[in-house]
């Protein structure tokens, strides 16, 4: 663990430096976590909500962080779980399954003023939406955020071999989708 990360964790876990340290934490990870969440939930507004929930959960639970993994791995795990919880609640609220919710989110991307992608990006997002949830996570984190398999393993609590297989299968499915559509 980097020395500055260790001192940040110590400050986050102390009662005196917590607020200043938390502002530092937010400035360090806000953008990376936003895009990670955005790749999962698709909508800018939903990503903002989930990001806020993520930081609230981190603030409330930072004392429980044992530094057995890197801080960003812990943050990504919380953000991933919050995004999935958000998707599940959203689907349940609309009385639809997760696949239908994903399809709806992709369709809403076209009208999202914050979506800057072109037709190819939209087609890629549609292809990703056809994947099972775990493959979506692995593909998004590897392809868009260029995380190493060792990092993915910490975040998703899965072996590197399983993650490599998942990514390979996801890439093949996306390739087939793009060729057929």
Image (cartoon, helix red, strand yellow):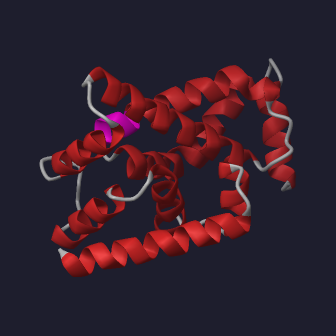
- Report the quarter where the N terminus lies: bottom right
> In the rendering, at what x and y percent does residue 72 appear?
68, 48
Q: Is residue 63 left or right of residue 148?
A: right
Give coordinates of residue 113: x percent, y percent.
Answer: 17, 48
User: Residue at position x 79%, y 48% from top?
Assistant: 5
Q: Quick check: can you spot residue 146?
A: no
82 sits to left or right of 108? right
Q: Residue at x 25, y 44 (%)?
A: 105
Q: Is residue 102 above or below residue 177?
A: above
State which quarter of the image contains the C terminus: bottom left
In the image, residue 3 sits, relative to residue 168, either above or below, namely above
Q: Main secondary structure of the magenta part?
A: helix
Q: Is residue 149 above or below residue 14?
A: below
Q: Residue furthest bottom?
A: 179
Nearer the observer, 104 or 16: 104
- Let me know if residue 46 is in the magenta part: yes
Count of numbered marks: 0
In terms of image quadrants, where is residue 179? bottom left
The image position of residue 137, as x and y in percent, is 50, 55
Q: Is residue 118 visible?
A: yes
Residue at position x 21%, y 43% from top?
Answer: 104
Residue at the image position 83 percent from the left and 23 percent from the top: 14
Rendered position, 131 above or below 48:
below
Region in magenta: 43-48
- The magenta stretch spans residue 89: no
34 left or right of 63 in image: left
Of 9 and 78, nearer the camera is: 78
- To which quarter of the image does residue 41 belong? top left
Task: Specify the farthest residue to the left.
Answer: 111
- Across and down, in percent, residue 19 comes to 67, 24
């Amino acid at each position: 663990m980097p020395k500055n990360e260790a001192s940040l964790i110590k400050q986050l876990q102390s009662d005196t430096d917590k607020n200043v340290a938390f502002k530092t934490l937010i400035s360090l990870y806000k953008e990376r976590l936003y895009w990670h969440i955005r790749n999962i939930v698709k909508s800018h507004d939903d990503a903002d909500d989930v990001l806020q929930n993520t930081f609230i959960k981190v603030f409330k639970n930072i004392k429980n962080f044992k530094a057995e993994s890197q801080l960003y791995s812990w943050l990504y795990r919380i953000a991933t779980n919050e995004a999935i919880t958000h998707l599940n609640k959203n689907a349940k609220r609309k009385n639809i399954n997760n696949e239908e919710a994903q399809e709806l989110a992709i369709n809403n991307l076209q009208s999202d003023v914050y979506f800057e992608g072109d037709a190819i990006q939209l087609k890629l997002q549609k292809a990703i939406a056809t994947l099972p949830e775990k493959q979506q996570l692995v593909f998004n984190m590897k392809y868009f955020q260029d995380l190493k398999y060792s990092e993915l393993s910490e975040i998703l609590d899965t072996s590197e071999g399983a993650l490599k297989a998942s990514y390979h299968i996801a890439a093949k499915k996306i390739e087939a989708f793009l060729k057929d559509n």
